[in-house]
Amino acid sequence: MDNKRRHTVALILIGIAVLLIGIILKIRSKEKPPLRPQYRLEVIEHWASAWSYEIYYGDQLQIKQEFVPGIRGKKHFTSKEEARIVGTLVLDRLIVGKSPVVHVEDLKKNGISH
């Protein structure tokens, strides 16, 4: 009976240890900040007064925006700064999981001519 009791106590202690390790690992995994996506923005000059932007996730091209979004027609960004502003807006939305769609109101709010 003594051996059976020792085995039972040993199994209970092992079970408690496994449970505690599981709890500790779960708590530690919640403490780690989530990995930030590796998005990056590149602003590209095509010729004088014609700019665009590209957004990459790692090395993979996700968005290639050659024209000002949210307006009719095909109009290039007229400055590097305009392309950077809109590209950054889209990039920030992607990072937080929002839709990257740009509307005319977004352009006006950011001083982008169209």
Image (cartoon, rainbow, N blue to C red):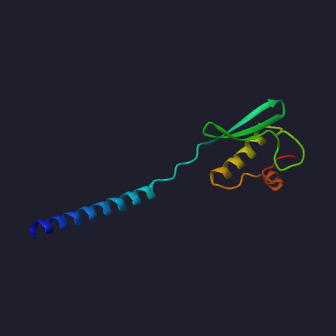
Q: Nearer the viewer, residue 37 or 79?
A: 37
Q: Is residue 16 left or right of residue 96?
A: left
Task: Name the spot of residue 84 as percent of width and height, x first.
Answer: 73, 41
Question: Which of these two is toward me, 106 or 102?
Answer: 102
Rendered-image quadrant of the N terminus = bottom left
Residue sticking out furthest to the top: 47
Q: Quadrant of residue 96?
A: bottom right
Using residue 94 as the reference point, say whether residue 14 is left or right of it.
Answer: left
* Residue 78 in picture, x, y percent from top left: 83, 38
Q: Position of residue 3 (x, y in %)?
A: 11, 65
Placement of 33 over or under 83, stated as above or below: below
Q: Which residue is farthest right?
A: 73
Q: Out of 71 and 88, give the one closest to the viewer.
A: 71
Q: Residue at x 17, y 64 (%)?
A: 7
Q: Is residue 79 left or right of residue 100?
A: right
Q: Position of residue 6 (x, y in %)?
A: 14, 65
Q: How many marks?
A: 0
Q: Nearer the viewer, residue 6 or 73?
A: 6
Check the image and report above or below for 44 versus 69.
above
Instruction: Tell me the residue at 40%/56% (across/down).
Output: 28
Residue at horizontal 51%, vertical 52%? 34
